[in-house]
Amino acid sequence: MAPRSKSKAAYMISSVAEQYGIHPQTLRLYEREGLLKPSRSDGNTRLYTEQDLERLEVILHLTRDLGVNLAGVEIILNMREKMRQMHEEVENFVETLNQEMSTRSREAAPQAPSGVRTLIRLVDAKRR
């Protein structure tokens, strides 16, 4: 697949089809199946963003290289999205937990003996 530079550009169906060596009807099929959702211009022309092209690359890898049918592609794409959401939730939870631990250790530090206060400061510094 052709490397692309990151930009906010939108590409028309003909250029995307040519870039990836597929027929425009294949892109329309992916849209009908709900695998791609390009935006539309005022004249109703399909416009593919960088995000659409990244998704297309995954679809093409699954179908061309791994032999996955379109029903399987849909399941895999849905699972990838759920995994991304779960990863984001876990990251948010860990960040909240670290903030809470840091707050509690600072509150406990003045009451702790000198050596323990030093240890708490080192742990806090390591977390950052």
Image (spheres, rainbow, N blue to C red):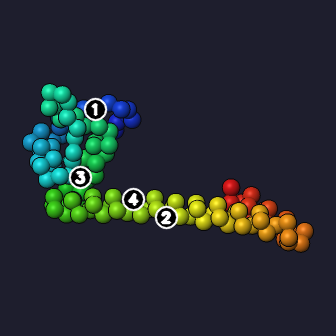
The Cα atoms of the two marked residues, 3 and 1, are separated by 19 Å
Q: Which mark is residue 63?
A: none
Name the residue tied to disc 4: 84
Mark positioned earlier in the residue sequence (3 or 1): 1
Mark positioned earlier in the residue sequence (2 or 1): 1
Q: Secondary structure at mark 1?
A: loop
For the point 12% across and 43% down, the residue is: 28
Mark positioned earlier in the residue sequence (4 or 3): 3
For the point 15% across and 31% down, the residue is: 45
Q: Does residue 19 appear in the picture of this structure?
A: no
For the point 56% across and 64% down, the residue is: 94
Q: Give the class, few, some or many, for how many residues have Cα within 10 Å of label 3's Cα (few <14, many ≥20).
A: many
Q: Position of residue 16 (x, y in %)?
A: 21, 36
Three-letter code for the amino acid on which mark 4 is drawn? Arg
Q: Secondary structure at mark 4?
A: helix
For the point 15% across and 49% down, the residue is: 30
Name the residue tied to disc 1: 10
**Residue that protrudes farthest toward the top in the picture:** 43
Q: Exactly how many numbered labels are in the figure?
A: 4
Q: Which mark is residue 59?
A: 3
